[in-house]
Image (spheres, helix red, strand yellow):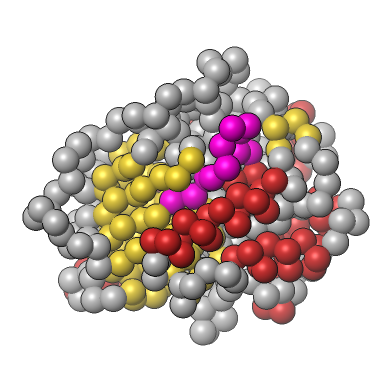
Amino acid sequence: MEAPGSPGESAVLRLGLIADIQFADIDDAPCYFGSGWRRYRNSLNVARAAVDVWNTAKVDAVVQLGDVIDGHNATKGCGTRAALAAVSTELDRCTAPKRFDLIGNHEIYNFSRSELPSSGLHCFAPDGKTYRSEVLGDQWEVIILDPFEVWLRGYDDSLDNAFLQEAIATMNKYNKNALSEDVGSWFSGLPEELHRFSPMNGGASQEQVRWLDSTLAATAAAGRRALIFTHVPLNSAASRPSTLVWNADEILSVLHKHGETVVAVIAGHDHDGGYAVDSAGVHHVTMNAALQVPSGFDSCCAVLECYDGWARFVAFGRACVESRSCGKGSAYAEIILARGAKNVPSQPALEAATADKSEAQ
């Protein structure tokens, strides 16, 4: 589609984007559900290539969408701090003055909530909250969600924590199998619409949802447009039923209430990527994982060019492919994030997908 705006319009803001680096100094391994390979060491090369792209584009800020290092660093003794230092060394080469690090499940596999402030990750607002917003320029606001605020892990095993108790109650209500250590039983007999209720996803608190509503109201009153960033997707058409925020519908109702303000939701988590536009006209981009860059490619990142009321997602490598193709479908060279925009993937598919399996862990 031809981009909106006047010919020669210049971007007022540029953001560098990357998802699911999941670096670990361990050998490659097949994905848990059989759709590709996890190239743990190579992900550092992908991060390095991304910084080169962003520096060339002169981005104003970077949004690292979470899962910057893999949980194996904690469980296999590979060295959480050493792994994070290796990735940070690459990301810190970026000349952008700001970087936003989102909280993914692997951040909490490596650090408890109480350890995150000293981890070196840029996860916190000045008030200490892990969900936050920041105005960038005169026309745009970045809004970052924490989709693991209500979760089964990360709270120092304190059963008195209200968010942990809420997570346990949620699992007991929707998917008791998820409290079992038998991963193979998590979805046994469970309707597809409840597959989001698994331990690899989480939820936002009611306080966070109310904050989102009031923040978007203020954004609209100021005449700005909003970009929503979350590690876990909100729309199953841009991901899968098994890789969604637990209370995604509640969050979406807030976004749709402010639909003229919200331009797009950008996420990671589902390593196979996807793209869709929802019923309210909000664009949903799920970025492919830097961890799983296929052979023959050395990039998996994007530059988000923001204009007057609309934006362009410019992909480098297979940064976003058509939904539910096991990461092997046709890729988007660019995605126009504007009302009424019709986007079609223009880059060739990889070999035909052989199974429709989720790949987010």
Q: Give percent across and percent down for residue 158.
A: 79, 68
Please, which residue is most extreme toward the right here?
A: 77
Residue 342, compared with residue 141, is above or below; it is: above
Determine if the magenta segment contains residue 222.
Answer: no
Residue at image coords 67%, 68%: 89
> In the rendered image, which quarter contains the N terminus?
top left
Please, which residue is most extreme toward the bottom here?
A: 126
Residue at image coords 75%, 57%: 109
Q: Give percent across and percent down for residue 33.
A: 69, 28
Residue 88, compared with residue 264, is above or below; it is: below
Is residue 137 in view from this perspective? Answer: yes
Question: Is 122 left, or right, of 211 in this rendering?
Answer: right
Question: Is 333 left, or right, of 199 in this rendering?
Answer: left
Residue at image coords 40%, 66%: 59
Question: Is 233 left, or right, of 222 in this rendering?
Answer: right
Q: Give percent across and percent down for residue 16.
A: 44, 60
Residue at image coords 66%, 28%: 36
> In the rendered image, which quarter contains the C terminus?
top right
Question: Is 251 left, or right, of 120 in this rendering?
Answer: left
Is residue 242 in view from this perspective? Answer: no
Q: Quadrant of residue 343?
A: top left
Please, which residue is most extreme toward the left here?
A: 6
- Residue toward you, 102 or 19: 19
Q: Which residues are magenta?
A: 292-302
Q: Quadrant of residue 12?
A: bottom left
